[in-house]
Amino acid sequence: MPTVYITGGATGIGAATVRKFATHGFDVAVFDINGEDVAKISAEIDTGSVHFFATDVRNRQAVRTSIAAAGEKLGAPDALFVNAGVQKLQGIFEMEDADIDLIIDVNLKGTLYTVAEAAALMRDAGKGGTIVLMASDQALVGKEGSIVYGATKAGVAQMAKSLALALSAHKIRVNAVCPATVKTPLTDHVFSWLADKHFDGDVNAAWAAEAQMLPIGRVAEPDEIAEVVFFLSQPTSSFMTGALVPIDGGLTAQ
């Protein structure tokens, strides 16, 4: 049975991707700090399997320990989706050191730590594999309040390119997805901030304004991103590596 490792798989895009792979018969290793929601997903699944490994991706030793445990239990991954991330909107004159460190540590360092450990398992297994990194539309465009977040996602996008070159000799493909706004628990917090700042606290108005920015006229659902992640992890995308794939409702076409 094929195996996929997914970080940040408890909610949102990560959870949708866990369900997608599991329903296609994958054994899914989920690396997250939220075991309760992972257990709920596992209870829904009647194909494949879901296994939780408590992991704070900011801590390299924790990542190393969890991935080693997954390798012992499930074997080397055929696919890896590095999805764990955090976002907090702040203006240039409002940024706090603790928030800057958190965003960099989770989004950038956590991605690097995860790839280093999981790719080593793929290399040693000798059968190749696929890696998909979670970048963002903010690797390609700027947005209000997202200076640090956008910088980390641009870093992840560049990491995908460099990793694609570094790992190609081991038959490991690396791509990144760059979604525009997706309706998830993470973005709910973001739009509360935007609503307070621009819409007198009206969160629905903030979401409506975001939808109007996109030629497709709405924001994305997590399942739509999961479909692309799954495609990039399959042989049908075998000639793709080092790609940054916008899933943005036409945002960057404007």
Image (cartoon, helix red, strand yellow):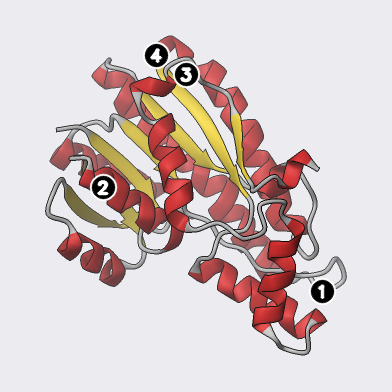
The amino acid sitting under disc 1 is: Glu
Q: Is residue 59 visible?
A: no
Residue 62 percent location from the top left of the image = 36, 52
Q: Real-space Cα distance between discs 3 and 1?
A: 39 Å
Identify whether 228 is placed above or below 189. Answer: above
Front residue (pair 227, 153): 227
Q: Amino acid at mark 4?
A: His
Q: Residue at horizontal 80%, vertical 51%?
A: 142
Residue 170, label in figure: 4
Q: Nearer the viewer, residue 185 or 127?
A: 185
Q: Circle 1 is placed at which residue position?
A: 94
Q: Position of residue 209 (x, y in %)?
A: 74, 70
Does 88 sit above or below residue 59? Answer: below
Circle nearer the N terminus (2, 3): 2
Amino acid type at image mark 3: Leu
The C terminus sits in image quarter: top right
Q: Is residue 204 above or below residue 8?
A: below
In the rendered structure, which amino acid carries the disc numbered 2? Answer: Ala
- First in sequence, mark 2 or 1: give its number: 2
Q: Which mark is residue 167?
A: 3
**Image spot of residue 158 (x, y percent):** 66, 32
